[in-house]
């Protein structure tokens, strides 16, 4: 399997509008971050995790072929706002979207024209499926295990694909969920910035501590703000086994 980081930024993206800091002014592509999303693929199956408002530009950078499933971590705009842009993929058939019950209701509310009795021509045909944590899902030849995460007080989902787990927008996790993260080789985890704790996101020291608790061999940090600093300089501050993800980075697992 392969994982491609389509986006590794937070809800503002990087560069941030109106910001003139050295990160936002950098020409290094690793310092330019679309909203967080990944593509998990085999030769036969493609799964998109989250679909934010940058998804059109993100998907223009990969070959155009069927998306077999869209997994949503939660309802927030930076993770769902681009669903309408998936309409060209309806050339391959309806698009199956999987999410917890709260997110399914939010998508139905936010995109009502996609679920009307009489659809106007060209509307994306979205098939919503409610899933729950710990209930395995098979998409083609990809096995998915949803894991329960807390985004402040909002229950959201992380996803495990074999030896890799993708977790974003986490602030806390119940101890009972750790059993579903045992034996990981690779952990992808949100890490907002170095300092100043956030009410609904991990900051980098918290993410490092959690990754050590899980015991994954390697951890890639995502959902990053411009406040982490320039990619090369910030990377020097990370302990062994940790890397900052960047848009376009691909992992084999």
Image (cartoon, grey):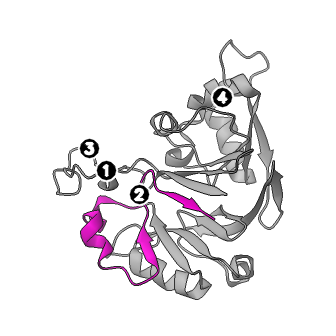
Residue drawn at point x = 56 percent, y = 52 percent: 38
Q: State whether residue 153 appears in this view.
A: no
Which image quadrant: the N terminus? Answer: bottom right
Would you say the residues marked 1 and 4 are in contact, meaning their CB atoms lie under 8 Å apart?
no
Q: Please report the bounds of the magenta region as a residue range.
A: 224-253
Considering the numbered disc 2 on the image, is that residue within a helix, a strand or a loop? loop
Q: Disc 2 and disc 4: Cα gap in Å?
A: 25 Å
Considering the numbered disc 4 on the image, is that residue within a helix, a strand or a loop? helix
Q: Disc 2 and disc 1: Cα gap in Å?
A: 8 Å
The disc label shown at residue 89, or none: 4
Residue neighbourhood size for the residue with mark 2, other residues' Cα within 10 Å, grouped as few (<14), some (14–19), many (≥20): many
Residue drawn at point x = 40 percent, y = 75 percent: 204
Residue neighbourhood size for the residue with mark 4, other residues' Cα within 10 Å, grouped as few (<14), some (14–19), many (≥20): some
Residue placed under numbered mark 1 in the picture:
29
Label whose residue precedes the other's in the sequence (3 or 2): 3
Judged left or right of residue 112, residue 152 is left
Judged left or right of residue 153, residue 97 is right
Q: State whether residue 169 appears in this view.
A: yes
Label whose residue precedes the other's in the sequence (3 or 4): 3
Residue placed under numbered mark 3 in the picture:
17
Q: Disc 1 and disc 4: Cα gap in Å?
A: 27 Å
Q: Residue furthest top?
A: 121
Q: Nearer the viewer, mark 3 or mark 4?
A: 4
Would you say the residues marked 2 and 1 are in contact, meaning their CB atoms lie under 8 Å apart?
yes
Q: Disc 3 and disc 4: Cα gap in Å?
A: 30 Å
Would you say the residues marked 2 and 4 are in contact, meaning their CB atoms lie under 8 Å apart?
no
Residue placed under numbered mark 2 in the picture:
246
Q: Disc 1 and disc 3: Cα gap in Å?
A: 17 Å
Q: Position of residue 57 (x, y in %)?
A: 45, 35
Q: Disc 3 and disc 2: Cα gap in Å?
A: 19 Å
Q: Is residue 166 magenta?
A: no
């Amino acid at each position: 399997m392969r994982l491609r980081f389509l986006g590794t930024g937070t809800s503002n993206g990087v560069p941030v509008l109106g910001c003139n800091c050295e990160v936002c002014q950098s020409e290094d592509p690793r310092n330019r971050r679309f909203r967080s999303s990944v593509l998990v693929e085999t030769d036969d199956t493609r799964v998109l995790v989250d679909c934010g408002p940058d998804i059109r530009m993100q998907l223009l950078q990969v070959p155009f072929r069927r998306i077999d499933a869209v997994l949503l971590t939660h309802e927030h705009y930076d993770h769902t706002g681009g669903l309408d842009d998936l309409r060209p993929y309806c050339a391959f058939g309806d698009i199956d979207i999987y999410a917890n019950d709260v997110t399914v209701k939010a998508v139905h509310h936010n995109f009502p024209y996609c679920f009307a009795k009489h659809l106007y021509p060209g509307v994306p045909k979205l098939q919503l499926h409610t899933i729950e944590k710990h209930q395995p899902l098979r998409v083609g030849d990809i096995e998915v295990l949803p894991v329960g995460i807390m985004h402040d007080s909002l229950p959201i989902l992380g996803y495990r694909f074999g030896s890799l787990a993708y977790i974003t927008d986490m602030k806390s996790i119940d101890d009972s969920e750790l059993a579903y993260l045992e034996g990981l080789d690779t952990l992808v985890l949100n890490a907002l910035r170095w300092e100043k704790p956030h009410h609904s996101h991990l900051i980098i020291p918290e993410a490092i501590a959690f990754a050590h608790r899980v015991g994954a061999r390697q951890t890639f940090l995502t959902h990053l703000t411009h406040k982490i600093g320039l990619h090369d300089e910030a990377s020097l501050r990370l302990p062994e086994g940790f890397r900052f993800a960047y848009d376009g980075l691909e992992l084999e697992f």
